[in-house]
Amino acid sequence: MQRAPAIIGSAIFLVIAPGTLAVYLPWYLTLWHFAPALFPTARVLGAALIVAGLPILLDSFARFALQGLGTPAPVMPPKRLVVTGLYRYVRNPMYVAVTALIAGQGLLFGSVMVLGYGAIVWAGFFLFVVAYEEPVLGEQFGDEYKRYRANVRRWLPRITPWRG
């Protein structure tokens, strides 16, 4: 019975947080209107970032609900540390995915404003992770998180999966 609230909570948080940051605000800034390309392969790179980012985001949210038995939202945190799937490669695949989605839209729609917005969002993620999330996870999961943190980088994925 613990999974149903986690699934519902994760779905709601997915719509509210990444939905606002990675869909609504880029739309608001561009109305998804194509401006001239920023450079010759910008649209292709932008589309690739969007195509790569969306499944990463959805998989990460699903793992929080199904394996962590919680949500990414601090009000309903996971009961278990999630270290499977893409979390074996990078500690923060959700933040990486949201940033990729925003940057992808900036490149796809030729919007320097969206790219700047994406840089601000990433800086916010960085500060949140360092100042709040990592200390809280360290307290909540102790040595398990310490071991994970020592083996899996914060932003840049490992080449091989961590098998801790």
Image (tube, rainbow, N blue to C red):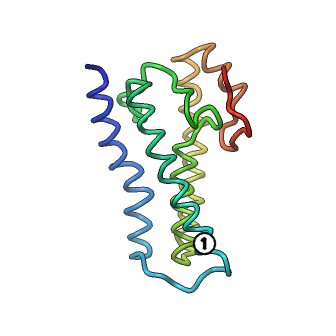
Residue 17 drawn above or below residue 138: below
Figure quadrant of residue 19: bottom left
Along the line of sight, the residue nearer the viewer: 87 or 20: 87
Along the line of sight, the residue nearer the viewer: 2 or 75: 2
Estimate the x, y position of residue 111 in percent, counting from the top left.
Answer: 54, 76
Element carrying mark 1: helix
Figure quadrant of residue 11: top left
Estimate the x, y position of residue 151 in percent, counting from the top left.
Answer: 72, 27
Judge the density around disc 1: few (<14), some (14-19), many (≥20) Cα neighbours within 10 Å.
few
Residue 146 drawn above or below residue 100: above
Q: Amino acid at mark 1?
A: Val
Which quadrant of the figure contains the N terminus? top left
Estimate the x, y position of residue 110 in percent, counting from the top left.
Answer: 56, 78
Estimate the x, y position of residue 53 in percent, counting from the top left.
Answer: 53, 53
Q: Residue at x 61, y 16 (%)?
A: 144
Q: Residue at x 42, y 75 (%)?
A: 32
Q: Residue furthest top?
A: 143
Q: Residue furthest bottom?
A: 36
User: In screen coordinates, is 88 left or right of 24?
Assistant: right
- The residue indicated by pointer 1 is 44
Q: Residue at x 51, y 17 (%)?
A: 140
Which quadrant of the figure contains the C terminus? top right
